[in-house]
Amino acid sequence: MNRENLLYLNLSVDEKDISLGFAKTWTDQFSENFKNVDVITLNRPTEITEHENINIYGISNSDKSSKLKKYIQIKNLIQKLTTITNYDLCFSHMSPLLLVLTRIYSKNRKTPRILWYTHPKPKEFSKRVILLLSLIFSDKVVTASNSSFPYKSKKVVITGHAIDYQLFHNERRDLLNKEFIILSRVSQSKNIELAIDCFLNSKFNNNSITIVGDSVTAQDKEYKKYLKEKYFHNDNVFFKGKVTHKSLPSILKNYSFHINATPFGFYDKSVLETLSAGLFNFYSNTDYNILFKEELTSFTNFKLNHSSLTEKLNLVYDLEEKNLLEIIKLGQKNVSNHSIKTIFNRVIATVVS
């Protein structure tokens, strides 16, 4: 495959977005491997860092126009770019809709199309239809784990998740404290309330737990408001809110434990990033078990209920520090297979094959 021109589709290129800020890492990786990278995004910040071979187009995050006008804007943009540039690859990161639109409006339908998607089946009927159409229109679908793409297809390739391993890597020689962090979008689907309650009912409850991340939808914002009101009088629960993706490594150095209570079907990169940073992880999704020896998952993996997580927390509380560090180092070593460069090569290999 030629590596001249890439069309990269995504939801956001805003580095300040804790959930989607990692798209910037993908952009940088593509720019090192393609002579020209054109980005179409649904959230283009007003201030953009200039790059010699990266061009960013799309909907400005300050654009208040109607959905119809935005749709027409994207349609015209796709037609314009695919008319003047012959792309060697179209890569859509978590944006089935943009991939479908490029298939409909692109002037060159022979361009290979790859969809990256790591999420359970959408609840809304319209989004399920769009996802199925993107599967039909894609040459390949790449996903992080066995459960992170909701439909079975021969097009689906499991590559692992892509993280900036070098950015997050922190060789932990000891546990500085017993402080906890939850790195997550604040949403009911993330079961943050369950995680906090179990922490407060465990032997760790004299320490603190900090939730880093923000809410996106109106429903998520109501949930965040509910959580802050529920734990308002508890001095051990903190809500840090939105931070930049770039600032996460320095923040994570202040914590020793991370809880991820998202169910099977999600494959949050927060587990991989916190493992890279040297944090001990508690997680409910069994897909992460591959990062540890089977006998060690009895300390890390919990079932999605209060008794299971509380039991795991108390079990780990009583472990000697040297045993905790051994588990951390093993997970950290295996997470190195999820570096952005490794995953990029696996993604490109799907096209070549």
Image (cartoon, helix red, strand yellow):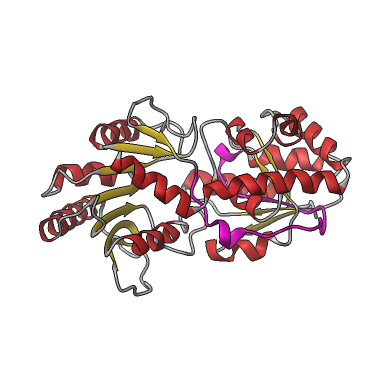
Residue 269: image location, x then y, percent: 54, 47
Q: Nearer the viewer, residue 36 or 10?
A: 36
Residue 196: image location, x then y, percent: 72, 43
- How many numbered marks does the figure carry? 0
Residue at 41%, 57% in the rendered image: 26
Does residue 235 appear anywhere in the picture?
yes
Residue 291, relative to residue 35: is it above or below? above
Residue 107: image location, x then y, percent: 10, 49
Q: Nearer the viewer, residue 56 or 73?
A: 56
Within the magenta stretch, is there residue 167? yes
**Magenta extent:** 161-190
Q: Nearer the viewer, residue 194 or 203?
A: 203
Residue 58: image location, x then y, percent: 27, 60
Within the magenta stretch, is there residue 163? yes
Identify the main secondary structure in magenta: loop
108 lies left or right of 4? left
30 lies left or right of 112? right
Residue at 17%, 52% in the rendered image: 75
Does residue 61 appear anywhere in the picture?
no
Q: Quadrant of the C terminus?
A: top left
